[in-house]
Image: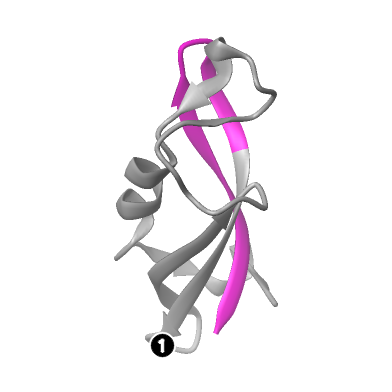
């Protein structure tokens, strides 16, 4: 299933919230496991991402995408697309 949820990334300016769209596998009635991150803030994860284009907002999208894989999430906190 495809899900969307809010997460945060660490930038030089501090933590910033981002929207993540991912593929997930249902593991129980109320929980799922993230298998693959498709987009972070409507962009494919890459090494040099930025929320606003400013250097102080830059973060490594590949790192955060890989960190999300394997996490177990409650379906009540996700939006199923």
**Which residue was labeled with disc 1?**
28
Q: Secondary structure at mark 1?
A: loop
Classify the position of the C terminus by image quarter: bottom right
Q: How many marks?
A: 1
| x 61%, y 50%: residue | 43
| x 57%, y 57%: residue | 39
Considering depth in this image, is 27 or 23 the residue closer to the camera?
23
Classify the position of the N terminus by image quarter: bottom right
Left or right of 62? Residue 16 is: right
Give the vertical position of 30 relative to 51 (above or below): below
Q: Is residue 13 magenta?
A: yes
Residue 75 location (% of width, % of height): 56, 73
The structure's colour scheme is one colour
Left or right of 32? Residue 63 is: left
Residue 24 location (% of width, % of height): 46, 77
Give the vertical position of 48 relative to 57 (above or below): below
Residue 54 location (% of width, % of height): 63, 14
| x 50%, y 80%: residue | 30
**Dot 1, how many residues are within 10 Å of its Cα: few (below 14), some (14-19), or many (20+)?**
few
Report the span colored magenta. Answer: 1-17
Q: Quadrant of residue 47?
A: top left
Considering depth in this image, is 39 or 81 the residue closer to the camera?
39
Considering depth in this image, is 62 or 20 the residue closer to the camera?
62
| x 40%, y 52%: residue | 65
Left or right of 73? Residue 4 is: right
Residue 68 location (% of width, % of height): 37, 55
Considering depth in this image, is 24 or 27 the residue closer to the camera?
24
Give the prevailing secondary structure in the magenta stretch.
strand
Give the vertical position of 68 relative to 17 (above or below): below
Give the vertical position of 71 relative to 14 (above or below): below
């Amino acid at each position: 299933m495809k899900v969307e949820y809010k997460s945060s990334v660490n930038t030089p300016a501090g933590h910033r919230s981002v929207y993540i769209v991912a593929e997930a596998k249902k593991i129980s009635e109320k929980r799922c496991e993230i298998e693959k991150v498709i987009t972070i803030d409507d962009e494919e994860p890459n090494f040099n991402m930025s929320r606003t284009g400013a250097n102080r907002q830059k973060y490594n999208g590949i790192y955060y995408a890989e960190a999300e894989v394997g996490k177990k999430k409650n379906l009540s906190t996700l939006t199923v697309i």
